Image: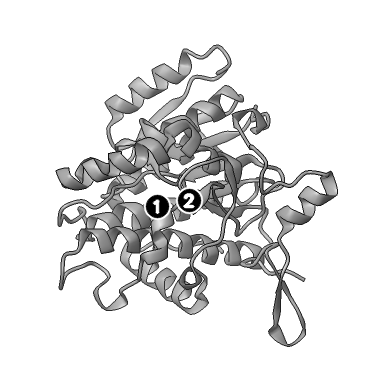
Amino acid sequence: MTNGFCGAHEVILSGGRTRRRPRERAAGKAAGVDRRRERWTEADVPDQLGRTVVVTGANTGLGFETARVLAARGARVVLACRDLGRARQAAARIDRDPNCPPPPETVRLDLASLASVREAAGEIGSAHATIDLLINNAGVMMTPDRRTADGFELQLGVNHLGHFALTALLLPRMLGVPGSRIVTVASNGHKIGRIDFDDLQSERRSRPMAAYYQSKLANLMFTYELQRRLAAAGAGTEALAAHPGKARTDLIRHLPAWMRAGNLVIKEPLGNRAAIGALATLRAATDPAARGGEYYGPGGPGEFRGHPRLVTPARRARDTDAQQRLWRESERLTAVGYPV
């Protein structure tokens, strides 16, 4: 049998031992296709007509490209963004596409404020009785030492705690929806991240890079614990994660000038443009073969670029005890409760 965390990647044998069973490889052989080399593209996104989708940080970069494709496939898309003016501009750009039947909606969401998260969730919940997809995409990277409105280290607060709270508040709108999914955008950089439970908010020492990688590891730990809880509750909703590789977006805007220059040197020849970087998110959100607890990223060398496939997280992301400890601490800090 399989569990909610391992999904199709590991089979639980007698005595608790596990054996690897890559579902994607088996499915590909059955279909006569090696899915590890498959070029999954926008054209593979199935029809989304009648589905309601919430995308955070959808006014630019990966979030915009994700929302654009889902809207073009017929989804009713809600752009949840900190800057409402930029969100409306993005919605207007998407609405120009003749394949986008319902015009996108916009909601102000500042993930650095739990009050704003609650307000946005209330607005979305009032407008939509059900939600099919929640894409936790918004994020900040290597910001100066700043705090959220609630006193959290900014990167942990925006990238993890804000999305943790938003997901809890919107989940009741998803649990009764067959095929509903929560996709959280992580980073390949999680592999060098550590959850510092003794200094979770970087109060003793400010290290923007370590704080960023900690927040991205938290994204994956959140996804796996959420999926485990959903599976245990027998819910129809599933949790998955994705990362874009070295995508060319404005996420690097807070880096020092010398680091921005270095990133450009790497990303121009080796990185993905935003539309390709968003494919991992789109695959996790819409591929009928995707399952809860899976993690998608670029299939090229180093997972820097390429079309999306199943990828393997760092071992520490699979630490069940740490996942549950982080979950308890996140509930305490955000004062939200989950229905699963």
Residue in front for this viewpoint, 44 or 309: 309
- In the rendered view, tell whether residue 121 sits above or below residue 127: below
The kind of secondary structure element at disc 2 is strand
The N terminus - image quarter: bottom right
- Residue 3 visible, this orientation: yes
The residue shown at (34%, 43%) is 266
Judged left or right of residue 92, residue 14 is right
Q: Which residue is mark 1?
A: 163
Q: Which mark is residue 3?
A: none
Indicate the position of residue 3 as horizontal and vertical percent values. 68, 69
Query: Would you say the residues marked 1 and 2 are in contact, meaning their CB atoms lie under 8 Å apart?
Result: yes
- Residue 130 visible, this orientation: no
The residue shown at (70%, 62%) is 8
The image quadrant that residue 204 belongs to is bottom left
The residue carrying pointer 2 sits among few (fewer than 14), some (14 to 19) or many (20 or more) residues within 10 Å by Cα, namely many
The kind of secondary structure element at disc 1 is helix
Which callout, 1 or 2, points to the residue nearer the camera? 2
The C terminus - image quarter: bottom right
Residue in front for this viewpoint, 104 or 175: 104
Indicate the position of residue 176 as horizontal and vertical percent values. 65, 49
Indicate the position of residue 181 as horizontal and vertical percent values. 59, 48
Outermost residue on the bottom side: it is: 15
- In the rendered view, tell whether residue 276 sits above or below residue 168: above
* Mark 1 residue type: His
Ranked by sequence position, the earlier of labels 1 and 2 is: 1
* Mark 2 residue type: Thr
The CA distance from mark 1 to mark 2 is: 8 Å
- In the rendered view, tell whether residue 57 sits above or below residue 50: below
Indicate the position of residue 332 as horizontal and vertical percent values. 35, 69
The residue shown at (66%, 42%) is 287
Q: Which residue is mark 2?
A: 184
